[in-house]
Image (cartoon, rainbow, N blue to C red):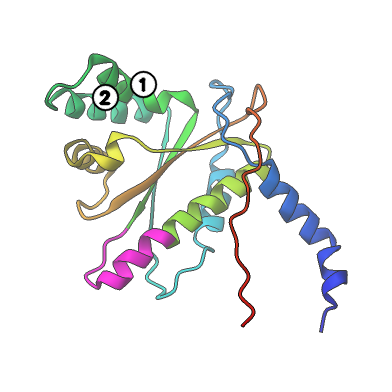
Amino acid sequence: MIDQKTWINANPWMVVSETIRARRSNLNVDLERPVPRELIDELLALAVSAPNHYRTNPWRFVVLTGAARARVGEVAARAAAGLPDVKESIVERQRVQFLRAPAVIAVASAADKDPIKHFENKHAVAAGVQNILLGATAAGLASAWRSGLAMVDPVVSAAVKEALGLAPTDEIVSFVYLGYPIAPPGTRTQPTIQVRYLDE
């Protein structure tokens, strides 16, 4: 059995803990420098290593680079323009949203007829997104987990999912923006840990 004190001082602990602490959302990226596809594939392999209770393999990925970013953004903008009382600034935000990084991964969760599996699928996918973000940090990439109308509005979401080639029943969990940093992320105060230990 490994002594706990020895384990917690070991190099793997330091690498993992420092990577987690270093991760920050950062969209200050070099828009002209592409992220190698091989590196993105490595990050996706980390994502599917996340816990998945029923082994349903719920992860669905679509990687946007180049002109695809503007094309899908235009789809989102057209769908948003049809919403009642929508502001033009919201429509324009949809149009340009995916141009903020050279690579954007749309991460979705597959539906399941079993309500428990359906519920757990989404959380497995969210855990996978965190693996992507931590892997990106370790690889020297800037990253950000973004949301938006394509996740929360049914009209925009349906149009974007069709453009991405996702199933209508898939649920978009995250848009992960990736790029090489040109400036550091902002600072963040460590939140107070809310915890109770129950021993009896």
Residue 119 lies within the magenta run:
yes
Of helix, strand and loop, which one carries label 1?
helix
Looking at the rendering, in which quadrant would you find the N terminus?
Answer: bottom right
Q: Amino acid at mark 1?
A: Val
Of helix, strand and loop, which one carries label 2?
helix
Residue 110's disc is none
Q: Which residues are magenta?
A: 110-123
Percent position (x, y) of residue 41?
53, 49
Looking at the rendering, in which quadrant would you find the C terminus?
Answer: bottom right
The correct choice, above or below, for 85 with respect to 131 in the image is above
- Secondary structure mostly seen in the magenta stretch: helix
State left or right for residue 166 relative to residue 1: left
Percent position (x, y) of residue 3?
85, 77
The correct choice, above or below, for 163 with respect to 76 in the image is below
51 or 116, which is in the foreground?
Answer: 116
Q: Are marks 2 and 1 in contact (CB under 8 Å)?
A: no
Q: Which residue is mark 2?
A: 74
Q: Residue furthest front?
A: 200
Q: Amino acid at mark 2?
A: Glu
